[in-house]
Amino acid sequence: MTTIIVGAGLAGLVAASELIAAGKHVTIVDQEPETGFGGQAWWSFGGLFLIDSPEQRAMGVKDSLELAQQDWAGSAGFDRDEDAWPKRWAQAYLRFAAEEKRRWLRGLGVKFFPVVGWAERGGYTATGHGNSVPRFHIVWGTGPGLLEPFENAVRAAVGSGDAVLKFRHRVDELIVESGAVVGVRGSVLRADDAARGVASNREVVDQFELRGSAVIVASGGIGGNHDLVREYWPARMGTPPVHMLSGVPAHVDGRMLAISERAGARVINRDRMWHYVEGIENFAPVWAQHGIRVLPGPSSVWLDATGRRLPVPLFPGFDTLGTLEHIMTTGFDYSWFVLTQKIIEKEFALSGSEQNPDLTDKDIKLLMQRVKKGAPGPVEAFKKHGADFIVADSLDELLTGMQRLSPEVTIDAARVRAEIEARDRELENRFGKDAQINALRQARHYRGDKLIRVASPHRILDPKAGPLIAVKLHILTRKSLGGIETDLSGRALDAAGVPIPGLYAAGEASGFGGGGMHGYRSLEGTFLGGCLFSGRVVGRAIATASPATP
């Protein structure tokens, strides 16, 4: 019999490729048109978390499994009874990231950009949140490059009759017989030629039923459904934002979580989620409320909506959720970067395969522009056309533009000026007390940051570094960190902790493993990695398991 996989994203494709390699038949169903093949991963920057890699060692980085375990524990903050399986998944994933992950991917033809990025720098103590060292490995080809070997394996299996792809098939029910999941029922949606990421129609033209030896739920999270995001918004982060941008397409709707619950699966840690605070409105949107995340270096001055500088250590790129929690205490759901042209040229990158044509298209000539004067083309395009960008020759002019863009609040212009002037005075010596300046100086000890990521320290008000730039930053939805609770084979568990025969979960739908292997926070590069690992685990587990017996 076939294995039914709900969702044609990275986790589902990895599981499918493992089953196909083991000689098994798979049927992949997805509510979107074929243009959406690959799911959210296609849009990704392609960052992967690796431990003690050759790329790290070549950049002078000393990493180890023990150091990564320390960082993960300090970030995850596991503190619930429900964290039993997530903790086991985290431990297994870290071993995978330190040992087999890179070798396995290289064997599939996946290569990496040689400069390793330093995401989620933390800024607390050694046992607190954050990466002690750079671990963010960018796939050469970004998200599409990572998907390619798994897409190719599935397409080849379709050609040989070992796989079936059923797009526009929306699962509405898991079929349960005698306590086992034996298939899916749902609606056939009207054909739609919508481009990748564009919302497709939901017109039902028929019904379908499929039966198989197992069902894998690999349908993603809730980031495209703002109502669900607000419903499960964690109380520790205050009132949910009124205004949010979407970092994922609308089809990332969370439907399969409730459907899986109705079949007996237990969904845990719903209030753990990962949203970015550096979202900007896409001036050429693909989906509704389409936002792009700025991947910032550490030099921009970060202000809240009223002009107050964010507290230590909430600097750009240091603590995503810590910054989100602070912003939500201000009474506003946006904040500001104030920076210079010199900073934007060196430190601004935009998340997404489509925003990085050099890396995505493997264009070395275009890639070399990153080390030359001037910001990357996509960044300059946002600076010119983006609604959230203000460019000015003086601080007064910049503040006037910021006030015009946020008329609902009075920006304390005197405070902003005082903060920036005080910060600039700290640069008169090679030492000082401003923690952010000390952090960026320390960052430049890492050759990757010095080469392409962190601008040399300079005064914000230095005319030679100008013009001045302000960027209005919005909350940007992205990932669910909770999900369907699973054991280390990816088997979905019921409320009593017993595996449900025939039902598995992988990827974001399973909290990237176990129902939330990240705990409260991510170290970045671990979402795609979690899809790879959980999809691989589930595919191999089903390939070696006996068929479920109703």
Image (cartoon, rainbow, N blue to C red):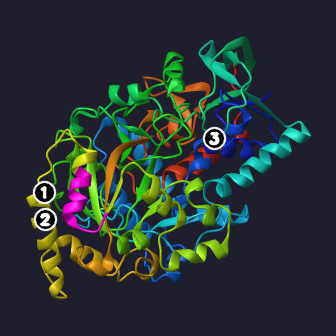
For badge 3, the amino acid type reads Gly
Report if the CB atoms under discs 2 and 1 are less than 8 Å apart: yes
Q: Which residue is mark 2?
A: 417
Work out whether residue 314 can be spotted.
no
Question: The N terminus is located in which quarter?
Answer: top right
Residue at (25% x, 47% y) in the render: 404
For badge 1, the amino acid type reads Ala
Question: For residue 358, what is the image quadrant?
Answer: bottom right
Cα separation, mark 3 vs mark 1, equals: 47 Å
Q: Secondary structure at mark 3?
A: loop
Q: Is residue 402 left or right of residue 259?
A: left
Work out whether residue 381 can be spotted.
yes
Badge 3: residue crowd in 10 Å (few <14, some 14–19, many ≥20): many
Cα separation, mark 2 vs mark 1, equals: 6 Å
Name the foreground residue: 52 vs 189.
189
- x and y percentages locating residue 70 in the rendered image: 34, 63
In the image, residue 401 lies in the stretch drawn in magenta: yes
Which residue is most to the right?
Answer: 160
- x and y percentages locating residue 97 in the rendered image: 53, 61
Q: Secondary structure at mark 1?
A: helix
Badge 2: residue crowd in 10 Å (few <14, some 14–19, many ≥20): some
Cα separation, mark 3 vs mark 2, equals: 47 Å
Residue 53 vs 312, above or below: the answer is below
For badge 2, the amino acid type reads Arg
Question: The C terminus is located in which quarter?
Answer: top right
Please tell me the numbered disc located at residue 413. 1
Q: Which residue is mark 3?
A: 9
Give the magenta range: 392-402
In the image, residue 354 lies in the stretch drawn in magenta: no
Residue 267 vs 38, above or below: the answer is above
